[in-house]
Image (cartoon, grey):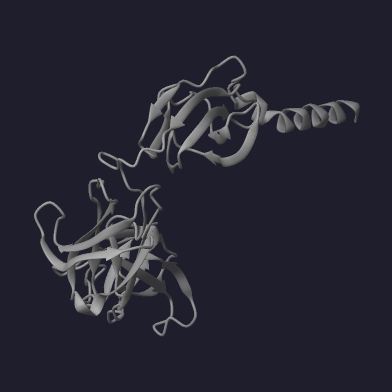
């Protein structure tokens, strides 16, 4: 009895301390900051804060304050990140930023840099941070809202949409002058196809470069996928069934499939597997474990990235007969 008690106690200690056992000790490691450089003075206001990856770290804490950490007048940012880069738009002034790495049981000390953003009106060479829609966004909505971060010292923005790639596409909407950091467009005026949108900040003496992203308008319902196997009436030998299909050619947004496997041809009961296209990603095959000497039915439908949903295919019936 005593021996069993000690074994349980030892097991409990190991279980509680497993995170500490597997996590690397970070207390003597320093985070190396890459950009912006320490004590940088610049008229730019768009920054990508960047630091080197720390082995054994699961996350990083990035903090930005003004004017410094000894006398904090404003907390600009305090966020935990899994990556080693983060875009921030700053206003003119003095700042300090710092980063520490941590995991489940330890953390590094902060590494701190200073930064000064001057109040120059010159926007030349500065960048704009676009917010939404995301790059390569696909939609079937009739109204699209485009947003970006405010640019200090910008008096107005030039908003433009082109068909196709930004570098080579044709203007669809004439340059539009806007005074806010968002604008709404009627996609019915654009029609289905691939587009790019871009924004430029302007004032009386200078302009930024255009910052662009791509998007797709797609209102076409995907065609039925072609079921390849199992074929209708096929007998499958074994405990695993591989379902395969193909997609008709489509020039719209990316297509995924939803698949249902059931023992009932109405698919109201006996559902063995129902898999979303979001889980299948862009695959055109799928494996399912099946029981012995049973009849199954399967069907699938296509859904594109813009949200257009096709109809289900006719079901296919097959039988599984396990080897003995």
Work out whether residue 18 can be spotted. yes
Instruction: Kindly indicate the quadrant of the structure image that contains residue 214.
Output: bottom left
- Residue at 40% from the left image edge and 47% from the top image edge: 152
Q: Where is residue 249 in the image (x, y as percent from the top left)?
A: 13, 68
Residue 78 in picture, x, y percent from top left: 58, 40
Horizontally, residue 26 falls left or right of residue 229, namely: right
The image shows a total of numbered marks equal to 0
Q: Quadrant of the N terminus?
A: top right
Question: Along the horizontal axis of the image, is 48 left or right of 76?
Answer: left
Of residues 223 and 261, the one nearer the viewer is 223
Q: Is residue 89 left or right of residue 230?
A: right
Viewer-side residue, 79 vs 250: 79
Q: Is 96 rendered above or below residue 220? A: above
Residue positioned most to the top: 28
Viewer-side residue, 265 vs 107: 107
**Position in image of residue 175 (x %, y %):** 19, 64
Q: Residue at x 28, y 52 (%)?
A: 202
In what quadrant of the picture does the C terminus appear? Answer: bottom left
Q: Which residue is located at x 30 percent, y 55 percent?
A: 135
Q: Is 293 rendered above or below residue 38?
A: below
Pick out the residue farthest to the right: 2
One can see residue 255 in this view: no
Q: In which quarter of the image is residue 298?
A: bottom left
Expressed as whole percent of the image width and height from the top left, the position of residue 218 reads: 23, 72
Q: Nearer the viewer, residue 251 or 171?
A: 171
Query: Quadrant of the rendered structure where residue 41 is?
Result: top left
Task: Identify the residue at the far front of this view.
Answer: 204
């Amino acid at each position: 009895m005593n021996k069993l008690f000690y074994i349980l106690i030892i097991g409990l200690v190991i279980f509680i301390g497993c995170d500490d056992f597997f996590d690397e000790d970070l207390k003597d490691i320093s985070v190396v900051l890459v950009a912006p450089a320490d004590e940088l003075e610049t008229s730019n206001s768009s920054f990508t804060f960047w630091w080197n990856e720390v082995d054994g770290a699961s996350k990083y804490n990035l903090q930005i304050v003004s004017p410094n950490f000894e006398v904090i007048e404003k907390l600009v940012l305090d966020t935990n990140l899994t990556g080693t880069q983060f875009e921030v738009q700053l206003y003119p002034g003095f700042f300090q930023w710092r980063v520490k790495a941590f995991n489940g049981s330890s953390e590094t000390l902060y590494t701190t840099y200073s930064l000064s953003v001057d109040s120059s009106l010159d926007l030349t060479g500065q960048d704009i941070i676009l917010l939404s829609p995301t790059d390569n966004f696909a939609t079937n909505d009739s109204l699209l809202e485009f947003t970006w971060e405010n640019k200090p010292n910008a008096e107005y923005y030039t908003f433009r949409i082109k068909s196709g790639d930004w570098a080579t596409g044709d203007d669809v909407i004439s340059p539009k002058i806007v005074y806010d950091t968002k604008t709404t467009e009627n996609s019915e005026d654009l029609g289905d196809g691939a587009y790019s949108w871009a924004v430029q900040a302007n004032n009386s003496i200078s302009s930024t470069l255009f910052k662009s992203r791509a998007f797709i308008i797609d209102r076409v319902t995907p065609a039925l996928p072609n079921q390849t196997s199992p074929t209708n009436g096929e007998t499958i030998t074994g405990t695993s069934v591989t379902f395969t299909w193909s997609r008709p050619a489509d020039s719209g947004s990316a297509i995924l499939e939803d698949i249902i496997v059931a023992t009932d041809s109405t698919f109201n009961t006996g559902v063995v597997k129902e898999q979303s296209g979001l889980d299948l990603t862009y695959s055109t095959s799928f494996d399912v474990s099946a029981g012995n000497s049973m009849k199954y039915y399967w069907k699938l439908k296509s859904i594109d990235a813009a949200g257009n949903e096709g109809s289900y295919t006719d079901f296919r019936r097959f039988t599984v007969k396990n080897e003995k």
